[in-house]
Amino acid sequence: MSRPILEVRNLVKRYGDLVAVNDISFDVLRQEVFGILGPNGAGKTTTLEMIETLRAIDSGEIILDGINVKANPLEIKKRIGVQLQSSSFFDKLTLSELLGLFGAFYGRNVDPVLLLGEVELQDKHKSLVNQLSGGQKQRFSIAAALVNDPTVLFLDEPTTGLDPQARRHLWGVIKRIKDEGKTIVLTTHNMEEAEELCDRVAIMDAGRIVSLAPPRELVDVLLAKGFKGERIERLASLEDVFLDLTGHSLRDE
Amino acid sequence: MNLKWKLMVASLKMFFRQREAIIWTLLLPLFMVLLFSLADFGGTDRTPIGIVNNTGLRADSVLTMLQRLEFLDVKEGTQHDELSALEAGERDLVLVLSRSNGRTEVLAFGSEARQQAFELASALVQHTLDEVTFQSSALPNRTLLIPRMVAGKNITYVDFLLPGVVSMSIMQLGVFGVAFSFVSLKKRGILRRLSVTPVRPGDFVTAQIVTRLIIVMLQIGLLVGVGVLVLDVHIEGGLAEMLVVGVLGAFVFLGIGFSIAGISRSEDQVAPIANIVAMPMILLSGVFFSRGHLPGVIQWITSFLPLTYLTNSMRAIAMDGASITQVGPDLVGLTVWALITGAMAVKLFRWE
């Protein structure tokens, strides 16, 4: 079996007395979608930002594609694609111009329209970012993270704040990127999203990983312990009702 | 190279697509010059005339009479000084009095560049002389002004103002333009997004600086162009010299702008700091009015302000046609300031 694309060993981040990330270790395998789950403040984003070179590593080691993050951040930046939480872009450039500029950061000549097609925004190539809806902005942000054809794509809470239609649409986009063979690491606190997209999930709480396995396995373990949900399993949820009434089509375009 | 070029093109595009930026940095100074050109602050109600007394008499009768007239602003001086003042456009008329055959002869010098002002002033003086002659028996014969013309310049307030506003707008672009845009990039997380790409902060900042230097040059060209073509401003010196001085000045104020961006967390903090830096200079560096009216100590202290150096050299080039070497002392002052503010910016400016 080939070496994991991302190896995190005994990672620690402290802010004064607070230990935001407390000695966590995990691997991400090639071409998998790896989810980091947890409530707000669990340390998901901090973990991601240390891998992305945005935050200093207090102790521990991160190896991405065989490269040590702490020792060689520039090489890491060339290999990763990052969608930051609520990231924004220059507001007076069109989507095409932005992607062209971001491509230049990596010394690449990108075809903006083709790239926008990947996230179904090809019609918007002449728009400005502030003319986009929330879902479109998130999709554009993913397109910008793809300009360098990254080895690992990092998505930090990509669907937070989106309506169900836009969220499901974004899931479709992420699945397609996965099918093209990309490795994706994402954070979320939406469990349905984790089940839908992730091959494996790490559940974080108070800076630690409390469990790490494929979503189905985690559920089976819980059931094996004799857990019974309070509600009887229903064949449809309120979200299904919502989508049945309002349709699957996107509202933002 | 490709990256630096693309960064520069992108930031130029961003600038020119920002309506507020164009209004504040390019159109406002222009509007200011146009507005002030309508109100002529340079002139006074009284007609400025010079008198050169070559009669040998301490109180020549004609001289005494002219000095009593309230609508005249009479300056007395040597023939050399007064004629230079006339050539520089500071006098409407210079009267040279001399005695011949027991009578006072009056030569009236006017500037060819300001023929109309000369004619008006000499008519006024002649008329007054005649009136007094008829009332008095002491002067039995009419004293006639003998006109003499010299070549000269017609300097208006706009000629004085334009290089001042050019200098001020360079300061505004550096201080306010840079500080606001970088704090905004920082606050909106754009710099953070850039920091996960391999782009070097230095490349990005360089592109921003080069962009602003280009805008400064456009601004100088625009103000001078409109001044000359629309407002009939006289520019004695070269545009090239003005551009050189302007770019040097821009470095000083870009340094201040980046320093302010470094110590401000939000746009709300930028405005007061930038105003504290800029306002005293706008008032004390001779942008709108000559610094000659300032009290001695203040005049001395403010002569070291960067905007004073910039305004002085810009004005010397524009009004007197000074060369780069002639404004050398001002350029040394600007260079020292550029080093100081540059070092400050390096110390205070933070990417995050």
Image (cartoon, coloured by chain):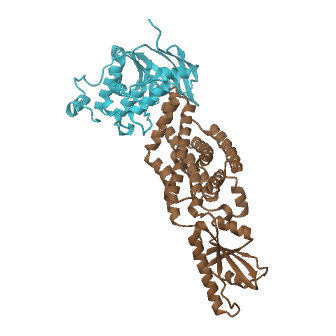
Chain colours: A cyan, B brown
Q: Does residue B108 sit above or below A110 in this rendering? A: below
Q: Residue at x 42, y 13 (%)?
A: A30
In the rendered image, the residue lying farthest to the left is A245
In the rendered image, the residue lying farthest to the front is B101
Q: Does residue B278 sit above or below B202 in this rendering? A: below
- Identify which residue, B125 or A131, lies in the foreground: B125
Which percent across, then down, holds residue A249? 24, 31
Q: Residue at x 22, y 34 (%)?
A: A246
Which percent across, then down, holds residue B184? 49, 41
User: Which quadrant of the view contains residue A174?
Assistant: top left
Which percent across, then down, holds residue B233? 55, 59
Q: Residue at x 43, y 18 (%)?
A: A211
Residue B352 in view here: no
Residue A78 in view here: yes
Which percent across, then down, holds residue A237? 25, 27
Q: Which quadrant is the C terminus of chain B positioned in? A: top right
